[in-house]
């Protein structure tokens, strides 16, 4: 019989090994699924396309980084709230509002050149995301309304609001009534950092934010505050932290960062506002945050991993005509195995022979 | 002499930890037998094995001379072993009778037990009304309900786990009368406690455990309280005494504090007045649930109070949060360790930061200086003899006594002008309790003021010069200890006038 016995101390080795084990198990499970569903295609070549090609191909690799950037930024913001036990599930909505706010500023100054335009758009996007998230913060602080429901429902409102904007004020006047904005002019587009690809400056900013977040969590009292509030609310009161501020700041930070990511998407790969702006990054970032155990530097890696699953998944769709749900199956298994393997950090597995 | 229960060489391990290591115990017929030991000594494990909720790894038991190895508590009860747990298992919304019936094996709710309950109630002086709702009963009455429930099973052995920890002195002496009568009528009692005075009063034999091992079985009356305590902790105890009592000027006062509780089952505080002077140790006695938690919340500053109610060094502090109060040199140690005074899943270093006056230098404009934090936690660990491999251990991995020493040390290294502490030695082993009392005394000797809120009357009596009693949200005047002080305290604890 297999028994789980609590460890006296968390296993340091397992903290590092369990993600690798989870990855291995995911790959093995994927292999089994492929063996069942693939008839005449070689399993090994599908595997190669899914896991290796995105890292080696000169077109796919920058695409992977393009996808990782918003996941990283949103994941970082969410991880801060999650540490405090504030469950912002609606980053997708804040991302959309950020995209609209940033995009609207860019369109307002259409064809106006200036280095100040991008920072202004970014600022508008951050404020937009913050304001949108602050609705949930206000309702939670004032009326104890559950933030999970509010943020989630406001996501649908945001998507509909985008659609209303694109059919109204932000529609391209010369766009044959398609619900799309004008294509942003050069000053409103993010600089490309890798010539010939879509990789933009947002990726660098995402990495900078990771390190800022790491500093905040490790070295600043605010990091302690959210950690204590999430882990022991009464101890947070004892320490003299104001729990309303914890709620407000967590939601503002996650909302602001989600807004920024929305702007990066609009002014980066998309280059305009379209109904296709929401890409589920806001939801996928929840997985990103938990895969990293809410650790900022971990999020840097987990966002790359999830981006790999996107890019690899798309590539096998195109190459081998496999269903698009491959990506989701892969992400689901990954999270499942990560959470399952985490138990090895706190418990050790013992095989004991049955007595008599 | 016949033995009702013989336990021989019981061993039980959890992983690498031996909770019981070759423990033996013999309980005579019709005797009250004490099981003594600190927290973690293995008392609960042994009792759970006897009561069938744990299986030993090795060793054997005999019940009335026959081999006995219960697979579950049901089997233990069938054999005639009953147990009153430290935490009662009663439904507050049901009546006494309904609760008793629910606790009996193989009995339908329809049956009428009123007569039988009243019979036992009369026979053993266990005053209960079968039709009363348990939610309205005092803690002592609830315990009586638990005992009657056990008696209905005609036990040959009644196990009582820390029965007096929640009782007033009067209730304790009533309980002892009942227990003695039970023993005379042929029911042996296994009495688990760490209160040595009680053990010496009613137990004819005592088995002492330490670190999972048997220290010895002895007749408690043949040893002094101090000897028993030293057997329990395995080292010498220091005598408690103030070296100098130098009462200075007033430092803290509570002026007509009135506070309605937000909680439906909370206690409203009614016009509480208290003055504390420098160098004095003031105690608030009282049974738990009489407003201690509500009062502590206001004193720490987790909740603010009206203007002019709380004054520290002439300054109104009622609206300040706990962090601001610490800046003024007021420090606090709450009762609850895990989750209130310390965060279980954080390291000791991180837990240092719960109490961080700016003057400590642990943070500079909110940026944490981890090396300073680590040096402070090392100092606490060294100075207060906290047993832990390092300050990187999680708070929850420490034993209650060690974590309490850490929490006391964390506040004391700031050399507070006023320390407010609730239940400083609750669930703490005797050795650690002795250390903690010693450090509180030397703090006061150096001129600081201390307010102790505690249910442990012995603790209050041995430490405090000024004693008040909190009952149903009302705080008594300071009790004059010269004339029948103990009796007055006892009356005040049950809500009477002094």
Image: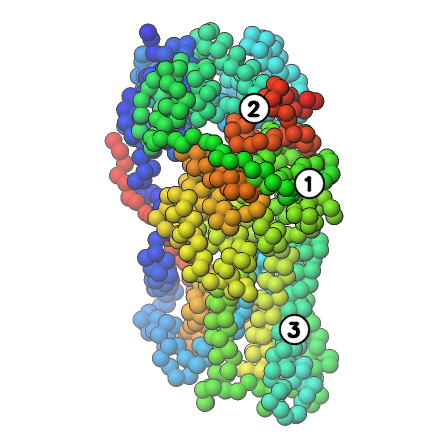
Real-space Cα separation, disc 3 to disc 1, in angstroms: 46 Å
Please indicate whether residue B436 sits to the left or right of residue B483 in the image: left
Instruction: Give neighbour class at mark 2: few <14, some 14-19, many 20+ (Cα, 10 Å).
Output: many
Q: Name above or below for residue B77 compared with residue B429.
A: above
Q: Which residue is mark 2?
A: B167
* Colour basis: rainbow
Comparing marks 3 and 1, which lies closer to the viewer?
1
**Which residue appears at 50% of the width and 68% of the height?**
A213
**Which residue appears at 59% of the width and 38% of the height?**
B247
Disc 3 is placed on an element classified as: helix
Q: Which residue is mark 3?
A: A127
**Which residue appears at 44% of the width and 19% of the height?**
B199
Q: Name above or below for residue B206 compared with residue A175.
A: above
Comparing marks 2 and 3, which lies closer to the viewer?
2
User: Disc 2: which chain?
Assistant: B
Task: State the residue in front, B386 or B335.
Answer: B386
The mark nearer the N terminus, 1 or 2, is 2
Real-space Cα separation, disc 1 to disc 2, in angstroms: 28 Å
């Amino acid at each position: 019989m297999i028994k789980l016995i609590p460890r006296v101390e968390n296993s340091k080795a397992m903290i590092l090994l369990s993600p690798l084990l989870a990855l291995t198990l995911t790959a093995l499970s994927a292999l089994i699924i492929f063996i069942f569903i693939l008839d005449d295609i070689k399993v090994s070549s599908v595997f190669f396309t899914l896991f290796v090609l995105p890292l080696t191909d000169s077109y796919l690799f920058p695409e992977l980084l393009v996808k990782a950037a918003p996941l990283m930024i949103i994941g970082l913001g969410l991880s801060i709230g999650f540490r405090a036990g504030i469950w912002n599930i609606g980053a997708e909505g804040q991302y959309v509002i950020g995209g609209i706010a940033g995009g609207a500023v860019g369109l307002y100054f259409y064809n106006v050149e200036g280095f100040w335009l991008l920072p202004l758009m970014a600022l508008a996007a951050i404020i937009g995301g913050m304001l949108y998230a602050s609705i949930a913060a206000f309702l939670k602080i004032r009326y104890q309304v559950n933030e999970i429901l509010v943020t989630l429902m406001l996501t649908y409102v945001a998507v509909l609001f985008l659609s209303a904007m694109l059919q109204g004020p932000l529609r391209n006047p010369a766009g044959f009534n398609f619900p799309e904005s004008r294509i942003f002019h050069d000053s409103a587009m993010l600089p490309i950092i890798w010539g010939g690809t879509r990789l933009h400056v947002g990726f660098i900013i995402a990495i900078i934010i990771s390190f800022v977040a790491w500093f905040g969590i490790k070295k600043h009292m605010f990091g302690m505050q959210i950690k204590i509030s999430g882990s022991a609310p009464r101890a947070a009161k004892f320490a003299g932290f104001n729990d309303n501020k914890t709620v407000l700041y967590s939601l503002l930070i996650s909302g602001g960062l989600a807004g920024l990511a929305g702007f990066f998407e609009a002014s980066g790969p998309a280059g305009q506002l379209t109904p296709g702006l929401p890409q589920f990054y806001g939801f996928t970032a929840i997985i990103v945050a938990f895969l990293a155990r809410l650790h900022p530097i971990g999020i840097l890696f987990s966002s790359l991993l999830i981006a790999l699953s996107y890019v690899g998944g798309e590539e096998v769709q195109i190459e081998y005509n496999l269903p698009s749900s491959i990506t989701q199956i892969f992400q689901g298994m990954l999270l499942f195995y990560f959470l399952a393997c985490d138990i090895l950090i706190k418990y050790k597995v013992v095989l004991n022979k049955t007595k008599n | 002499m016949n033995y009702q229960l013989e336990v021989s060489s019981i061993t039980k391990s959890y992983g690498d930890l031996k909770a019981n290591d070759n423990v033996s115990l013999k309980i005579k017929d019709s005797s009250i037998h004490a099981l003594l030991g600190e927290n973690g000594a293995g008392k609960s494990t042994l009792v759970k094995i006897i009561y069938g909720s744990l299986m030993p790894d090795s060793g054997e038991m005999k019940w009335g001379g026959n081999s006995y190895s219960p697979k579950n508590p049901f089997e233990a009860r069938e054999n005639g072993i009953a147990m009153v747990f430290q935490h009662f298992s009663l439904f507050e919304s049901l009546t006494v009778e309904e609760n008793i019936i629910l606790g009996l094996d193989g009995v339908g709710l329809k049956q009428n037990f009123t007569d039988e309950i009243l019979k036992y109630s009369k026979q053993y002086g266990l005053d209960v009304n079968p039709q009363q709702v348990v939610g309205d009963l005092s803690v002592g009455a609830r315990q009586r309900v638990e005992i009657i429930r056990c008696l209905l099973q005609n036990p040959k052995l009644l196990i009582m786990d820390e029965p007096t920890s929640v009782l007033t002195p009067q209730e304790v002496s009533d309980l002892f009368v009942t227990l003695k009568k039970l023993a005379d009528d042929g029911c042996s009692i296994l009495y688990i406690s760490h209160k040595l005075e009680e053990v010496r009063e009613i137990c004819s034999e005592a088995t002492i455990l330490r670190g999972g091992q048997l220290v010895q079985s002895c007749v408690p009356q043949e040893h002094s309280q101090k000897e028993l305590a030293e057997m329990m902790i395995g080292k010498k105890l220091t005598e408690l005494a103030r070296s100098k009592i130098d009462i200075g000027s007033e430092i803290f006062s509570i002026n007509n504090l009135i506070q309605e509780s937000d909680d439906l089952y909370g206690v409203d505080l009614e016009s509480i007045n208290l003055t504390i002077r420098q160098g004095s140790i003031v105690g608030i006695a009282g049974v738990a649930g009489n407003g201690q938690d509500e009062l502590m919340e206001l004193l720490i500053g987790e909740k603010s109070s009206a203007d002019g109610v709380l004054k520290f060094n002439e300054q109104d502090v009622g609206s300040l949060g706990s962090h601001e109060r610490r800046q003024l040199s007021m420090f606090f140690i709450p009762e609850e360790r895990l989750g209130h005074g310390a965060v279980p899943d954080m390291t000791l270093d991180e837990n240092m930061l719960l109490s961080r006056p700016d003057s400590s230098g642990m943070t500079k404009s909110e940026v944490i200086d981890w090396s300073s934090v680590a040096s402070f936690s090392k100092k606490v660990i060294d100075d207060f003899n906290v047993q832990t491999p390092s300050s990187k251990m999680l708070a929850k991995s420490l034993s209650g006594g060690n974590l309490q020493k850490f929490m006391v040390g964390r506040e004391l290294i700031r050399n507070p002008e006023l320390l407010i502490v609730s239940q400083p030695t609750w669930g703490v082993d005797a050795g650690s309790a002795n250390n903690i009392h010693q450090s509180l005394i030397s703090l006061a000797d150096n001129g600081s003021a201390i307010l102790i809120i505690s249910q442990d009357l012995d603790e209050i009596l041995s430490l405090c010069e000024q004693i008040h009693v909190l009952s149903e949200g009302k705080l008594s005047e300071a009790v004059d200890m010269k004339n029948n002080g103990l009796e007055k305290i006892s009356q005040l604890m049950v809500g009477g006038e002094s």
